[in-house]
Image: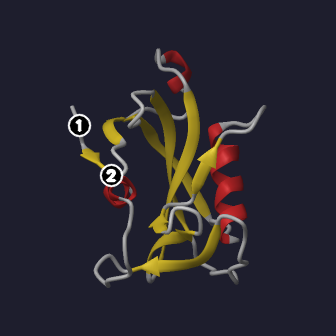
Amino acid sequence: MMICTNRKGDVFEEFIKTKEDQFDNIDINPITHALVVAKNKDGFLLLFNSWKKNWELPGGMIEAGETLRDCAEREMFEETNQIPERIEFRGLMKFTLKSGKVEYGGLFSADIELERPFLKNDEANKIIFWDGTTEIGYIDEIDKELLKYY
């Protein structure tokens, strides 16, 4: 059951609600990445991806020896310089990429109480705490849909 498709042709197929300590029992492969839907009093944390030229959620690929949670926290810090006061596992996302490859990722929600200064980096050249309505430019459709899972 398709949830949404982005302009690249990648499809968000399914959200699998599970507990963080139980997804090892589910027959899914590969789990490749983690994404974070983070929020503060002003709105949702988005970064402007310098390569893709669009707004998206913090997140990225799991490194060797890393847990999904480790990946989510590391990517959020590397890309946005933000450290959440709370981070909670929400479930697994199933994607079918335009190439036909199927992959899964972990989704986390997070609360940011103290906004830290943004440090421009290779992947992101700015961040915003988006109120959900202000026009800011193109936001990846899948990432926009994932805001609902906060």
* Residue at the right extreme of this rendering: 65
Above or below, 18 relative to 82 = above
Kindly identify which numbered label has been placed on residue 2: 1
Which quadrant does the N terminus fall into? top left
Residue bearing mark 2: 6
Q: Residues within 10 Å of mark 1 (few under 14, many from 20)?
A: few
Q: Amino acid at mark 1?
A: Met
Q: Does the CB distance between marks 1 and 2 fall below 8 Å?
A: no
Q: Position of residue 83 (x, y in %)?
A: 68, 67
**SS at mark 2 in the image:** loop
Could you tell me residue 116's position as x and y percent?
A: 69, 80
Left or right, 82 with respect to 147, comes to right
Report whether residue 149 is seen.
no
Crowdedness near tag 2: few (<14), some (14–19) or many (≥20) residues, C-alpha within 10 Å: some
Question: Which colour assignment does the render follow?
Answer: secondary structure
Q: Is residue 107 above or below residue 27?
A: below
User: In the rendered image of this protein, does residue 48 appear above or below residue 145?
Assistant: below
Is 48 or 127 nearer to us in this picture?
48
Q: Is residue 42 left or right of residue 30?
A: left
| Residue visible at 71% across and 54% down in the picture | 74
Q: Amino acid at mark 2?
A: Asn
Label total for image: 2
In this view, the residue farthest toward the left is: 1
